[in-house]
Image (spheres, rainbow, N blue to C red):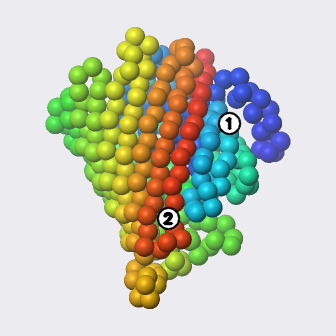
Amino acid sequence: MNLKNCFPALMLVCSFAVQGQTTATNRPPPIRKQTSSAGTLEQEKAPVRMRRIWLSLTMSTVYDSNLDHDETNLNSFGFVPSVGLHYRDNVEKPNFEADYEVGLHRYTNSNVYDRVSQNLEVAYRKYLGRKWQARTTGVVSLKGSSEDRDVDNEYVLEQQLQYRFNPANRLRFFGAYRVKRYPTPDVEKNAIDPYFGARFDHRLAQQRRWEVSYRYDKNRSAGVKDRYVRWTHGALFETPVRRAVHDLLTLEVRYAPRLYARQIKVDGTRVARKDQRWVFDAVYERPLSTDVRMALNYRYETRSSNDSEKNFNSHLLGVTFGFDWWK
């Protein structure tokens, strides 16, 4: 069956229910899945209903004040319907997890990011006694999106190791080997981009929690233009808003300075290009029923650089609905 011919029907279905795929360029972050994501080692919250296999339908709509993240400030409205299939070998403490999602991306004023994306993620978790857990994750993302807002293919193999000091405190170490592949004519951007880092998670009373994280990655691209080293520092705070209806507010900030291998001219002197990027995220999530969820998102992103043509500011507003179906 031709996938392109199936999507008009998929869009019609998604318009009645919706939400769930992996993060995509120019769209809000997805509503939290019912089981752990690639960045965690265990379930953060127990679902209302537990099951091993389920289908998710999603719809995200978004307004971006700076679609291309440059000085042109091209604004755009976009929508992303998607469908996902999810499997866990155990509903409470899964050792094996698999998620496949496919999404249609459409935006106004530009067709650069219009595409059909696919994402496959499989993970195996091993409990090493009472304190330690190990998790191995493999990800294949086709025409997906990355933190650099690139429409590329990515292949990732990640290893995590978690130590639980007590029920309230966890420390995670992670490292990954990542391959990026771009279509013609951007083959010079093809890269090996491994990363490693750590995350500390502290859980408070009344279902609140905060975390801090650090990640280092080195993008070794085929062309010198896109070679860089990046240090990403992050902090997150999560709190219920109205416990009676299980509303959740998440605030996150990330700071990511980047040092490029290539040099540019600044005041007549050749120096290495240096960027500093800040991202501020606020996500409000609310369950509308047992199987339907809604999220509102605001993101502010800014980059300053010694290359004056690379500075930008961006505001993003998004609404996402999600629906889970199973028998």
Rendered residue at 37%/15% (across/down): 243
- Given the image, on which type of amino acid does mark 2 rest? Asn
Q: Position of residue 5 (x, y in %)?
A: 83, 42
Q: Position of residue 212 (x, y in %)?
A: 28, 45
**Image quarter in which the N terminus is found:** top right
Name the outermost residue toward the left: 165
Circle on res. 202: none
Q: Give the secondary structure at mark 1.
A: strand
**Residue 4 visible, this orientation:** yes
- Point out the frontmost of discs 1 and 2: 2
- Asked whether 166 or 294 is in front, the reply is 294
Q: On the image, numbered disc 2 is attached to which residue?
A: 311
Number of numbered markers: 2
Using the image, determine if residue 220 lies above or below residue 110.
Answer: below
Rounded to the nearest angstrom, the CA distance separating label 1 from label 2 is: 31 Å
Q: Give the secondary structure at mark 2.
A: loop
**Image quarter in which the C terminus is found:** top right
35 sits left or right of 159 in the view: right
Q: On the image, numbered disc 1 is attached to which residue?
A: 81
Judge the density around disc 1: few (<14), some (14-19), many (≥20) Cα neighbours within 10 Å.
many
Judge the density around disc 2: few (<14), some (14-19), many (≥20) Cα neighbours within 10 Å.
some
CB under 8 Å between discs 1 and 2: no
Using the image, determine if residue 246 lies above or below residue 250.
Answer: above
Q: Position of residue 54 (x, y in %)?
A: 57, 26
**Residue 179 visible, this orientation:** no
Rendered residue at 43%/64% (across/down): 304
Rendered residue at 23%/38% (across/down): 170
- Given the image, on which type of amino acid does mark 1 rest? Pro
Using the image, determine if residue 238 lies above or below residue 288.
Answer: below
